[in-house]
Amino acid sequence: MSKYKAYPDYKRSNIEWFSCLPSTWKVSPIKYLFNIVNGSTPKSGVTEFWDGDIVWVTPADLSKLSSFKVSSSTRNITEKGLDSCGTTIVPKGSLVLSTRAPIGSLAIADYDLCTNQGCKSLVTISDLDVKYFYYYLSVATEQLNLFGRGTTFLELSSSDLGSFPVPVPSQKESRAITNFLDHETAKIDTLIEKQQQLIKLLKEKRQAVISHAVTKGLNPEAPMKDSGVEWLGKVPEHWGVSRLKFECDVVDCRNKTPEYFANGEYFVVRTTNVKNQKLNFNAALFTDQKNFEIWTQRGIPPAGSILFTREAPTGEVCIVPENLKFCMGQRMMNFISNSQSYTNYLFDYLISDCLDHYINSVSHGSTVSHLRVEQVENIPVPVPPEEELIAIHEHIGKLKTRYNAIENNAFKAIKLMQERRTALISAAVTGKIDVRNWQKPEKREEVVA
């Protein structure tokens, strides 16, 4: 922020998170600047209340936004639905804030709309620069959560939101701040978008390279043959083509998930625990010794074997880690090969585009993605010679390392830019920097603030 000067004079604000403000600024509770409008929900089972023309915003809608405006919602309601539940339509230009699950998602209404009870709308009492207050609240999420109450989940009441303090510059200053932030955040957002596009391209390139290696091999001069599988196409002439059940043991879980125990010592791996080719312990659930013995009667998944999800979601895989006491929950499967080389190759094959092609070929247009046990057992799989199995896995490993390094650098760059964006907004809306005389630079002078 060193390129921007500070205001000439400051005063104490008596507010912890912006202890000083420019001497001409004021501090006001939200209730003296905005009318706070609560939302509500029509009864879900009444058809005539739903699928109308009235935008009905929820916290989930706000959390998905890619801009500062909200103009649509996942579900709309009818006039009858509106009248039935007491929610109120607020005008275009109102601030819409999620006040529970989570607190702090925010947007400016681009149309007249209403909300559910998880949101509150802020309608200006007088002529204010709403965008300035949008920027302020966008960096005040932590403070808003401190005002929340509740045991099951935090919720921000109308009373507590109304008492939330905000810095208030003159209207001329607030508009200057908004103009400055619109320009500077747009530049940062453009740079973030470029990094996100790079990550997307890297993922596509990585998938293409893996898919080619596991289906065509590493020798571009190798004679090819028809695999007999339409989506698999041609494979090297000296490779075999088989079915999964002939190349490894395919172990299905029991057709239900074991009972959970808060003090259980055995991890129950559910489909939600397998993501991004790793076993994660988010929302981990456990069972006891008795259930563990029942659910592992078909065998304990050995370390180094493959776990596979056949539904919700379909086709996630990970390698079983060492020294983990666990059993499989519903819709989980375990692939066990006598050859570690083939296990490594099979893992790479399953994370390639090949599995998606297979799922599409057996789903017959169904919108529900799942595989039956026999469909998993019959996944077509190439069978390269041992030395090629090793070479392909090593080749893919090197590519992953290279692509992951570039991707990690892109993620770091995005994180730094997001932090920079937040810091710039915070500095401007609390008067730490003086942008009253800021002018939009000529294009040739453009640099990120």
Image (spheres, rainbow, N blue to C red):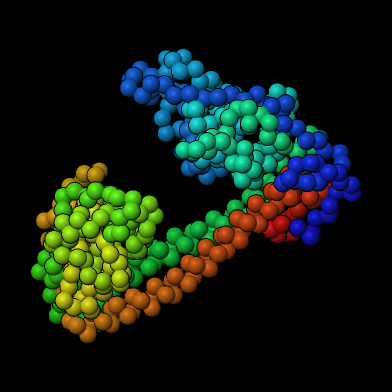
Q: Using the rendered image of the protein, determine whether residue 270 is visible from the camera's viewpoint.
A: no
- Residue 333 percent across, percent down from the top left: 20, 59
> In the picture, which quadrant includes the N terminus?
bottom right
Q: Give the residue drawn at x 80%, y 55%.
A: 4
- Depth check, front residue: 403 or 305: 305
Quarter of the rendering containing residue 207: bottom left
Q: Is residue 266 left or right of residue 69?
A: left
- Residue 305 percent across, percent down from the top left: 23, 70
Q: Residue furthest right?
A: 8
Q: Give the residue drawn at x 86%, y 38%.
A: 24
Q: Residue furthest bottom?
A: 387
Q: Give the residue drawn at x 63%, y 31%.
A: 160
Quarter of the rendering containing residue 321: bottom left
Q: Using the rendered image of the protein, determine whether residue 326 is visible from the camera's viewpoint.
A: yes
> In the picture, which quadrant includes the C terminus?
bottom right
- Depth check, front residue: 43 or 189: 43
- Residue 413 percent across, percent down from the top left: 57, 63
Quarter of the rendering containing residue 448: bottom right
- Depth check, front residue: 230 or 402: 402
Q: Is residue 304 left or right of residue 443?
A: left
- Residue 211 percent across, percent down from the top left: 29, 68
Q: Give the residue drawn at x 51%, y 40%.
A: 102
